[in-house]
Amino acid sequence: MRLQDLLPTISVNDSWGKNYRRFVPKFISYAKERIHVNDWNAEDRDQLFRSVNCISSLKQGNFYLNEREIIQEHWDELMSPLGIIVDNPNTFCIEQCYEIIRIIKKHTESNRPAASLRFISAFQPTQLSTTVTWYYLDEIYNSMKNVGIDLPEGYGGDAIHKSHYIQTFLKECYSDVDDIERGTYAWRIPELLNELKKLEPQAISQTTDEAPLSITADIFTVSDVLRMSLSIPDYQRPYVWSTINVEQMLSDIKNSMEQGKRQYRIGSIILHNADIVDGQQRITTISLIKLVWAKIENVDREQGCMLTFAHEQSFGHIQENYEYIKRWFNSIPENRRIEFISYLNKCCEFVVVRVSGRDSLSLAFKLFDSQNGRGKSLEAYNLLKAFHLRAMATSDENQKITCDREWEQSTRYGRNTRDGIIAYDILKHLFDEQLYRTRIWCRNSEAWSFSKKRINEFKGIQIDKFHTVDFPFQNKQLLLFMTEKFYQVFLKDTITTCSRFIDGDGANINPFVSINQPIVNGSSFFDYIRSYAEIYKKLFLELDSYQMYDFKVFYVKYCLSYKGHWRIGDNYIREMYKSLIMLLFDKFGEIGVNAYHRHLYVLAYSLRRKQSRVYYSTVAKFPAQLFSIIDNAKDLSSLQRLETIIELPEYKEIKNGYEFPCYDEVLKSVIS
């Protein structure tokens, strides 16, 4: 987008220009001819400074009367650098600018860079913008950047360089405009852009998915955003902000207000038509703040936006945060409350990115995937939830809601500890370690950390009545998909499958899933995740249960209780060991784990026995061979290769190793 296309005309009140053209050229001619002025006309002198002020948006940075007299007294000293500036109207005379500032500072004994730059701009309006304070220069630049104007690279430096940059850019855009008039364009731009964005906020959702693809980015005040007709789509996670997040937002806004900042950017919002793709947490919290204020001040009309929430968990957080905001408001004086709300309405802003038209939902989620905004950051795996819920477009709404709730329950599993019940995010550990890295290790590759950049590992093919397979190699996935559906409908009650747990898996574990299976988008993916979340919980969290009791006793003693188990390197090894156990259990169930969990311990924890320090990179590169052996094993006898490896001298006799009694004890039990 070009600036001249967005703002084809800029209306300027020319009353200041008449005075400028009447008085300032005299002084430009004095400087150009290096004329010593004996008798300054007081009106001429004051109009010089007043004219400079007239072409500025700020009523600050002007020279006082005594300073004007000082400048007059030292005109001869200023004449040389000013003369060079007027002799070269199209040249950025940076050294002369600095020299003038130094001369004025020396004689007035005050540092007035803004006033000095306005003085200089009167002699060379082509090169210097008249808005010369750091704050407003940045505001001008950012206002253009935020609406997508194609700005050249190079903005930066001190106020002189920034002023020159903006004025040069404006000259390129408006080459036919008078230099003096163009000097006012810079400080008018933010105001004009603000007027453009004040379109009816409700118009954002009028575009249909049949229209051409459109993406816009605008800045809206809080009041504008809360007047929009927005909705929370089904695929969104619940409102999960805690009082800590709310307190942080309140403090940030209050601090910005007390520092006298004219604008505070709360963050960004991504909308697909009227659906909130990103920003639910911030918008909901702002709505709560407005609702609390309306209640306290007995305001008739409701202040918050009319969002509706589908998750039961949202209700608890909304109530808790509402009460916290009420206490926060009651803790500050009434006049400060009114000042805070006024600042929130008028000075706090959102960057609203709006995407609509054909294929716009996919684009909105790509923006969401790359968004790095404030608030409680989404884990990488939540991007996958949104992706696979979208893949369920043809599914029953109740099925989508069920998938969503089961997913959220896995992120907040209540785990018993010595300090009571704590929330444990099963999915974070599962994705970061036992699923992603296992799939990579089984390909005999180095397995590094899971991140948003690597979520494609869990995006597969779409199989439904509207999507057929694209390539022959996908026929196998189609066959497996259809076979499972056939089994569930016709054979489940007559042909039993083999359970992983000796006493049965339970309804939440699908007997047909495997860790390394090709991913099928939609409900099959949620079934895959639900199954391994349940397996993870039974193996590593429900440590007091009877299932696999012998392994759990071993795991607690040799992985969670030895001296130094809390160290970072030990955590790396433990997660690798858990991944090996998960893969072994996935292939051969409880019987396989009972037979080889000690062997895998020796092979994994040999790193701790060999090295006093274990790094993430070491673990990432270490176990691919072990995963490959398990993944390719066709029966338990194939796992005897693990026993063969342990017979190697490097596992039985480790010279200059690290003292680790647990390893020695387990090794002895394996080779005896």
Image (cartoon, rainbow, N blue to C red):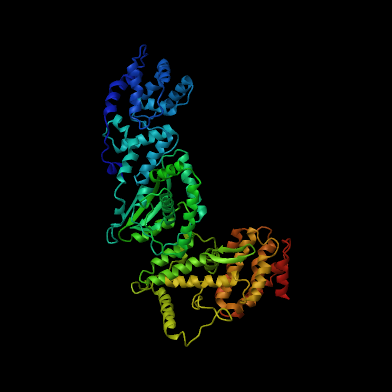
Q: How many marks?
A: 0
* Residue 87 visible, this angle: no
Specify the quadrant that holds the C terminus.
bottom right
State the residue in front, 188 or 514. 188
- Which picture quadrant has residue 348? top left
Does 57 sit above or below residue 239? Answer: above
- Which picture quadrant has residue 53? top left
Does 81 sit above or below residue 338? Answer: above
| Picture residue at 45% right of the left edge, 41% below the top | 335
State the residue in front, 248 or 318. 318
**Residue 132 position in % (x across, y down):** 40, 32
State the residue in front, 644 or 385. 385
**Residue 186 position in % (x across, y down):** 34, 36
Taking the image as shown, residue 82 lies to the left or right of residue 557, namely left
- Which picture quadrant has residue 468? bottom left
**Residue 64 position in % (x across, y down):** 41, 22
| Picture residue at 46% right of the left edge, 58% below the top | 318
| Picture residue at 35% right of the left edge, 40% below the top | 190
**Residue 429 position in % (x across, y down):** 55, 64
State the residue lying farthest toward the front. 298
State the residue lying farthest toward the top. 38
| Picture residue at 33% right of the left edge, 39% below the top | 189
* Residue 61 visible, this angle: yes
